[in-house]
Amino acid sequence: MTGVYPHSLDAKGRLFIPAKLRDELGEVFYVTLSMEKCLTAYSSEGWKALEEKIKAMPRSKQIQMRPLFAHAAKCELDAQGRILLPAALRDFAGLKKNVTVVGDGDVAEFWDTDTWNEIDVIETTPENLAKVFTELDF
């Protein structure tokens, strides 16, 4: 998934999912916590792969993964291409009104727009991009 899409939450906590990402995420997908102050959306296939990977871990490691499942929401698109984000997930990521939807490879991320703008400025410096390309052996 690729791209950066600014949107806003409506009064009921619904978020519009861009058409390009709807095609990749599918009609039903999963949203959960992230290592950063954002939410991560997985397609049904991506979620299944995550579940399988975690099932293969020893139980002691599986327990560490509990927050991913405990706080996950199965989201279904409505007729307008929106999903309802549960309040607990919105609170975790600090999503109030302005949300930036970011494609990040095989997942999408939902960021508070101000937080995303701060991260984006740091990540798109020539120095950081040089590190990225070096890591990719370019």
Image (spheres, rainbow, N blue to C red):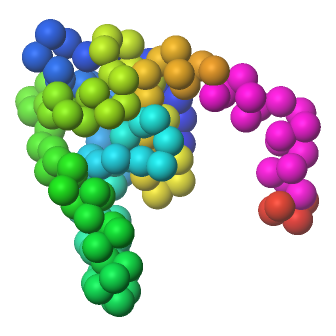
Viewer-closest of 113 and 43 = 113
What residue appears at the point 20 percent right and 34 percent down from the top-left corner?
88
Q: Quadrant of residue 122?
A: top right
- Residue 113 in the figure: left or right of residue 58: right
Viewer-closest of 88 and 81 = 88
What residue span does the magenta drawing correspond to? 119-134
Q: Quadrant of residue 97?
A: top left
Residue 38 visible in the displayed image: yes
All told, the count of numbered labels is 0
Q: Is residue 120 magenta?
A: yes
Q: Is residue 16 above or below residue 41?
A: above
Q: Is residue 39 above or below residue 72?
A: above
- Residue 40 in the figure: left or right of residue 126: left
Residue 26 visible in the displayed image: no
Q: Is residue 76 magenta?
A: no
Picture coordinates of residue 98, whole percent (x, y): 38, 13
What residue appears at the point 29 percent right and 73 percent down from the top-left corner?
63
Secondary structure mostly seen in the magenta stretch: helix
Picture coordinates of residue 93, whole percent (x, y): 37, 31
Q: Is residue 136 above or below residue 30?
A: below
